[in-house]
Image: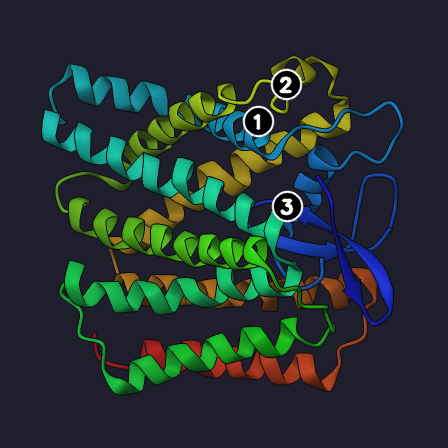
Amino acid sequence: MQVRVLSRGNSRMLSLSRYTLPTIQLSPYVRRPNYFMPLSVAARVLLNADARDQISLSPTVLAALRFSIASLFFVVPLSMAIVRRQLSVRQLVQMFFLGQIAFSLYFWLQYTGVQKTNASISSILVVGLIPVVTAFLSQFMGKEHLSLIKFGALLLGFLGVGIIVLEQQTQLTQGSDFFFGSLCLVGNAFAFAIYSNLSKRWMQDISPLLMTGGTMISGAIGLLLLSLTDPIHNRWGDIIRLDAMQWVALLFLSLGCSVIAYFVYNFALTKISASRAAVYIYFEPVVAVVLGVTLLGERLSWQTLCGVVVIGVSVAIVNLLKK
């Protein structure tokens, strides 16, 4: 799937992963992400194949396959916990519910929103809103108090994301599809915020390992069922036609960006508040900027540098405040 974005008069292609990134041609397998998630390079290899003999997977199949592979690493510890009766029926239901929120619903809302909007809007709404919405919902779903200073710091981070993303001029479109896509991306932020707050609350009785495994296996099942609702576009037979480079990209998404990333995030939720954990999402464009400058020789503009500083100040203020 490809979405065309107008950027400074040039047409660029947008790749999809957990977040959306405009890209330009770099090599048959690698595209340069703009300012978000390096994992988009891996997803780009699978979603928008460049070589003529490569096959492209649909976003739903890729998400289902990615988390199905990742789930295999949690089958044994989760099964042992169930056999030893370390998990109650209520806890299993909780993990199943969170899996549908954090994986099935989350990715459906994100992919739908990306298809119907554009790169800048989707990037701002996905990355920029999650920490703000997480902190807002923590007032009702957790024990946190959202002070005016913390709320202002979160909005400052949102501004920093906008400064970086909007450096590239994009053409806004109007219409029911664009509005619906924007609503999906807002809903996407709420889905992750709900997952963060409920996961933190329920991990008082469930370890991060079991919570990650239970939700991921549940989410993978939901994504598998979702992919079967549209067999014309979601062709599972294409998997056997993936080449070696695409399998490497798939394993990177499954291991690094799924198993490790989700486990580390859940572990962090057991140590700090949901709003403090979520605020580090603002560093995604910062990391991509650093990689772009150091590895790809990109120029660091004053606007981008300003956005990086603003995000850094936002994260520092949130972490300096009392819990």
Disc 1 residue type (three-letter):
Val
Q: Which residue is mark 3?
A: 16
Q: Residue at x 66, y 64 (%)?
A: 173
Give 86 or 39, whichever is nearer the viewer.
39
Residue 279, percent across and down?
40, 67
State which tag comes first along the sequence, 2 or 1.
1
Disc 2 residue type (three-letter):
Arg
Q: Quadrant of the C terminus?
A: bottom left
Contact between labelled residues 1 and 2, with CB atoms less than 8 Å apart: yes
- Mark 3: which secondary structure? strand
Q: Quadrant of the N terminus?
A: top right
Residue 63, percent across and down?
53, 33
State which tag comes first along the sequence, 1 or 3.
3
Q: Residue at x 60, y 69 (%)?
A: 286
Residue 207 in sight = yes
Give 61 or 274, whichever is nearer the viewer.
61
Rendered image quadrant of residue 262: top left
Check residue 316 in the rendering and tell me which mark sits there, or answer none: none
User: Alpha-carbon distance for marks 1 and 3?
Assistant: 13 Å
Answer left or right for 70 relative to 293.
Answer: left
Q: Residue at x 17, y 45 (%)?
A: 202
- Mark 2: which secondary structure? loop
Q: Which residue is mark 1?
A: 61
In the image, residue 283 sits, relative to residue 191, either above or below, namely below
In the image, residue 53 sits, relative to residue 275, either above or below, namely above
State which tag comes first along the sequence, 2 or 3.
3
Marks 2, 3: nearer the viewer: 2
